Image (spheres, rainbow, N blue to C red):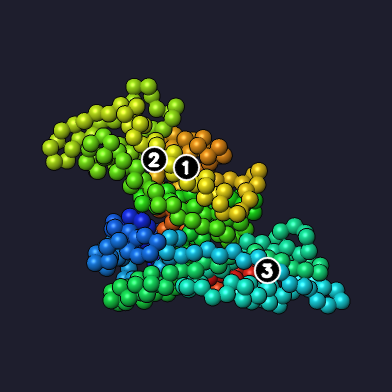
Amino acid sequence: MIKTTVAAIDFGTSKIVTLVAESSGNQRCDIVGAGVSYYDGYSENDWHNQSALSEAIEKSVREAEEQSRRRIAEINVGVPGALSKVYAVEVRMDLKGTDPRVTLQDIKQLFKKAVEMLGTFPGVVVHRSPAWFCVDDGKKTLEPVGMKGQELKALVSFVVANRNFLDSVDERLRAMEISVSGFFSSITGEALLFLPEEDRDRISVLVDIGYTMTDVIISEGDAAIYYKPIPIGSGHMASDLAEGLRVQLPAAEQIKRSYIFGSSAPQDQVYDVTAVNSGVTAMFTQAQVSQVLEPRVEELAEAIDECIRDSGVRLGQWSTLYLTGGGLSMNRGGRDYLSGKLERPVRDNPKRARKLNSPIYSSSLGLVDLIIDTMEQQNAPSPGLIGGMKYFFKSLLGG
């Protein structure tokens, strides 16, 4: 069995993750090497510490090479959500002929029209995909070819990357004698991997709480149709605890990671931390910690709720919100606490990998899965062959 090896690098708000994965008929995505390097991250406009960026990238890549025992000469780069924008364009066209039915050529024309409607924008399109097609006022579908009607409509999503990010990463990787095979949308990969297809068909939301930022991704069909970064993450929660409890940041992060939300916490729950320098141990009660920590989590919940309401996307009765990232997913009772504040069901991400299945690696795993999926589409049979039609739309509209 021939194995395909891919390398990918994902830029989170506090860490850079490089993965080396193998794909074969027996195993779609087997992680054979991983490198993690912590750094100062980025904002919506630029890196927080450019001078240390190259060293952080190299550390991540070299660790992955050492673990996988492979030299990385080519790599795929994930574009973070905060350094990209999502545009959802609704487009329509009349179907022509005496017996008008949707053809592949109609799809191409519709897509071309969507590009024209998108117009000019700063940045580079790194992903495009359909949320749905619809013939006349019929049911939404991702397979419209052959359907009869007078009008074809679609919602097409474009993910546009910040050009400065692309140039900056490409320059640093070339200095390491590594060429970029392609740029991919990390938020799209994460949504497609972790939001079940049946939930995406009903519109669903993925909330990824990182260290300095929270990503809110609304997805429908095969596309992310709305994205917004919220500048609140687990690092802000830890900073609040450090200030409010008067402890060092490492101790505050320890308390934050072990905190139990809501009724899950025993009545006598306490949190012990030991200062690294002095060795002095401090003890805090559940009430002391909750008084400092929970207001920040409530602020985040309010921002998430406002983000969803302002998105212009109407969630249905069966729309589901999924939670990932290290911010609350790993805290006992965290998901239920957020669900209560949002007044809607919140689910944990389904496990999609045997290795690195922690919520903190959701973005990186989604990126690798998107890359492998794209490679499979490129190698799929041509549209006239059995099975080829399934991949035609993705090969046409994918990144």
Q: Distance between the residues labelled 3 and 1?
A: 34 Å
Mark 3 or mark 1: name the one nearer the start of the chain: 3
| Mark 1, other Cα within 10 Å: few <14 / some 14–19 / many ≥20 | some
Which residue occupies 32% across, 32% down? 289
Is the Cβ of the residue at disc 2 closer than 8 Å to that at disc 3? no
The numbered mark at residue 296 is: 2
Q: Which amino acid lies under the numbered mark 1 shown in the image of this protein?
A: Ala
Q: Tell me if residue 110 comes above or below residue 42 in the rendering.
A: below
Can residue 143 be seen in the rendering of this structure? no
The numbered mark at residue 260 is: none
Residue 204 x/y as whole percent: 58, 50
Which residue occupies 55% across, 49% down? 308
Relative horizontal placement of residue 251, taking residue 202 as reference (left or right): left
Is the Cβ of the residue at disc 2 closer than 8 Å to that at disc 1? no
Residue 80 x/y as whole percent: 42, 62
Which residue occupies 38% across, 64% down? 45
| Mark 2, other Cα within 10 Å: few <14 / some 14–19 / many ≥20 | many
Q: Which amino acid lies under the numbered mark 3 shown in the image of this protein?
A: Val
Residue, disc 3: 91
Mark 2 or mark 3: name the one nearer the start of the chain: 3
The numbered mark at residue 301 is: 1
Residue 258 x/y as whole percent: 33, 36
Relative horizontal placement of residue 355, taking residue 201 as reference (left or right): left
Q: Distance between the residues labelled 2 and 1?
A: 9 Å
Q: Which amino acid lies under the numbered mark 2 shown in the image of this protein?
A: Arg
Q: Tell me if residue 226 comes above or below residue 4 in the rendering.
A: above
- How many discs mark residues in the rendered view? 3
